[in-house]
Image (cartoon, rainbow, N blue to C red):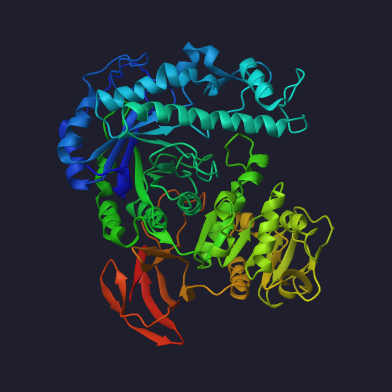
Amino acid sequence: MKRRSDSAFGLHFDFHASPAPGIVVGATLKEEDIREICQKIRPDFIQIDCKGHPGWASYPTACENPMPAFAFDTLALWRKVTKEEGVALYLHYSGVIDHRYCENHPEDVVVNADGSLAKGITRTMGFAYADKLLIPQLKELAGKYGADGVWVDGECWGTAVDFHPETVAAFEAETGIALGGKLPAGREDPYYNEYRDFCRELFRRYVRHYVDAVHEEYPDFQIASNWAYTDHMPEAVTADVDYLSGDFNPWNSFNVARYAGRAIAQHNRTWDLMAWNFRAQNGTKPGGVPKHPVQIMQEASTVLAVGGGFQNYITQYRDGSPRMEQIRRMEPVAKFVRAREPYCFRGKAEHEAVILLSQHDRALEAAGLYARSGYERTVGLTALFCDAGQSVELAGEFTLRGNCDQYKMIAIPELAYGLEEDMITELLGYAEKGGSLLLAGHNTCRIFQKYLPYTVDDNNREQQWRWVSLDHEEVGMLRDAHTITADGAETVVWYGDQEKETTAPGGVILPWGKGKIGLLAADIGWQYGDCVQFIHRNILRAFCDRLYTPLVKVEKAVGIVEMTALRKAGRLYVQLINGNGGHAGMDTATEDFIPPALDIALTIRLEKKPAALMLQPAGKVLDFVWDDRKATVTVDRVDIHEIVEVIE
């Protein structure tokens, strides 16, 4: 059986078991169904329910939390069949979030600032939950059942600020800060951020504690804490987890996949991401309706294209049996992934443009300890880069520090609070030595204004629309858009309060030492994610064309093409993804047709003429023109995901 590091494609099933009248776990589970999944879909791994957020184990555990009724030992059957078929078996297990445990052990529940108990959230201080249930149960899964690993759900995004007296006392003892009985519950309270940072550290210790405890006895048991060290938790890996993983937003999945994949790919770690097979309900819109395979393929593509593994989530029935009618529809998805696996799986993006995903700013802004508060800005900016055909990565301060010069352009999205002084100094030093910065957002431009010779107007334009143009003819709109003035700067974008009066400089390129700094005092990322305008793509292209020369450039295309320059085993693979379709709209739940992207013209800069350019996975030889160390090639059509392999 493959290790997770060698697994490009998996299936995830869960049902968050909880008692209900007539529910007998395993009542309709059939061995032949499990075997059919293994033989026809041939996933590298299957991930099934073990314990969900309600806290009931969906197998006959010897621990305290088994479901009331079982037809037989269902987990033993899953393990028997998957082992015989050579498919790895992982378990979905809810960690920090455990409603049953919290009801039975109120002493181990997070305490809110008002003294009430948080619903279903276990404390990480002291490791009581981990020692009483989590660790014994994971050891049972590894030892008795021989499972290959676990995907621990409900972790960083579920943990919460804890005001239990023991936690407060520990904070005061470790930091030397005397709270004097005043809990730092609100932003206006002293030591608010310090206390939240302490609670984050408690979570890190908790993960290290249970991972190390299980590995000590079962070193080959592979563990991931869902969304740890990803865009939810954009920081360096500090626990001995075996792989990184997360599951998409169930609405705007394609764009969130683009963002989350790039955030997680910065780590030199095994990783994969999970697509939901359905959209969740949104208002009056239907939820739970299975997506068409072409939608799943499109979501898979943007993960594969940056080197990740892909898994797809289909719920189990209430008795733990698989939804075979949906699983059978995964056969073309499996073939799609397998065809592309040789040309992208575990590849690494070439360092071109990179967007800063700030741990510092996110920590100050987030409503929860590791919430996605404010992430829409960076999701939107990532989508804008992708839709504009720019090969882009995401990186936190821990990745960029000391490595800025590896990137051709660094983009800073709209910041809520700012960056640490040393990070600002390093970014400006990078530009001064010849690098290119792009500052996008009014608050970001205001933060950097005290370091650079430009002025952002102080007019209160929040929530107000302004006309924007590149050439005083092609116009669109931006909200909260402010004028920038700087001596010696090149104006790229023009603003105006009237459609025919876009005469104020709204986006400029400022020379800075040997490098350049682009400035746009409007949050174009959030606005593109909220409501797409084609001029936003043209604005970004105009800045990028002036700020850096890419390795691969999308010269033109009919439709939207996402491009990533990926290198695997020393060879360049240009990933081309069709970005068309209604994936971002709340008025589209499922669709069976995505309009193709056509006539994609690329230029690829190379030191010498390549021996061939091949369109993969079809193995088609592409004609190209070689001139001035550039190969110019046209790809006629991209239905979902095609790859140009550069053979030197």
Q: Is residue 622 visible?
A: yes
Q: Is residue 183 above or below residue 328?
A: above
The one nearer the camera, 636 or 102, is: 102
321 relative position to 641: left or right? left
Q: Is residue 543 above or below residue 428?
A: below
What is the quadrant of residue 457 in the picture?
Answer: bottom right
218 relative position to 135: left or right? left
Number of numbered labels in the structure image: 0
The one nearer the camera, 497 or 193, is: 193
- Outermost residue on the bottom side: it is 627
Q: Residue at x 58, y 28 (%)?
A: 160
Percent from the top left, x then y, of residue 77?
Answer: 19, 28
Quadrant including the N terminus: top left
What is the quadrant of residue 525 in the picture?
Answer: bottom right
The one nearer the camera, 283 or 215, is: 215
Q: Is residue 94 visible?
A: no
Quadrant including the C terminus: bottom left
Q: Residue at x 36, y 30 (%)?
A: 215
Percent from the top left, x then y, of residue 617?
Answer: 28, 66
Q: Residue at x 32, y 14 (%)?
A: 68
Q: Is residue 192 above or below residue 446?
A: above
The one nearer the camera, 569 or 509, is: 569
26 relative position to 386: left or right? left
What is the quadrant of residue 567 in the picture?
Answer: bottom left
Percent from the top left, x then y, of residue 145?
Answer: 24, 26
Percent from the top left, x then y, of residue 466?
Answer: 75, 63
Q: Residue at x 45, y 59 (%)?
A: 581
